[in-house]
Amino acid sequence: MEPMLSLRGTVGSLAKGVMDLSPRARVKSDDEFGEYRAEAERLGRLPKPIVVRPVEGGHEIVDGEHAWRVARDLGWAEVPCEAIEGCDDFEARRLTYKRNR
């Protein structure tokens, strides 16, 4: 697996990835989601970048579905992303698990 690269992704361009990977997402309660949204609003940005991997036609979210949903709900057009090159399905699942422990 290659190192992460920083980039900015449009919220709309990441929509397909969220739909494809949502079974791996960690569940947040409404209160947790509200707290995360309030923090993003206070900061004027996401607390940490969304992790994506390249796929045909764009990028797919590996970690950060809740952040993407917050950005979408707040009407933000772009979000900070870190792209992982050479990340297969197994590695994507492993990273999601590791980052959400």
Image (spheres, rainbow, N blue to C red):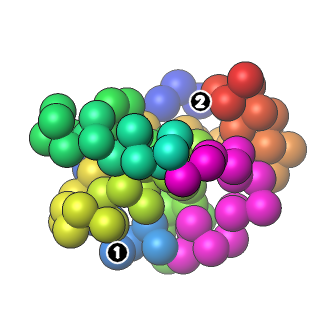
* 63 up-or-down from 60: above or below: above
Which residue type does callout 2 highlight?
Glu
Which residue type does callout 1 highlight?
Gly
Residue 68, x across and y down, in percent: 42, 57
Magenta span covers which residues? 16-30
Quadrant including the N terminus: top right
Q: Secondary structure at mark 2?
A: loop
Residue bearing the label numbered 2? 2
Residue 72, x across and y down, in percent: 33, 66
* 76 up-or-down from 88: above or below: below
2 and 1 marks in contact (CB < 8 Å): no
Reply yes or no: does residue 21 show up in magenta.
yes
Foreground: 28 or 69? 28
Between label 2 and label 1, give the one nearer the viewer: 1
Residue bearing the label numbered 1? 12
Residue 55, x across and y down, in percent: 59, 64
User: Can see residue 83?
Assistant: no
* 13 up-or-down from 85: above or below: below
Figure quadrant of residue 90: top right
Residue 46, x across and y down, in percent: 30, 39
- Distance, label 2 to label 1, CA atoms, is 26 Å
Which residue corresponds to the image point at 68% horizontal and 71% vertical from the top-left? 20
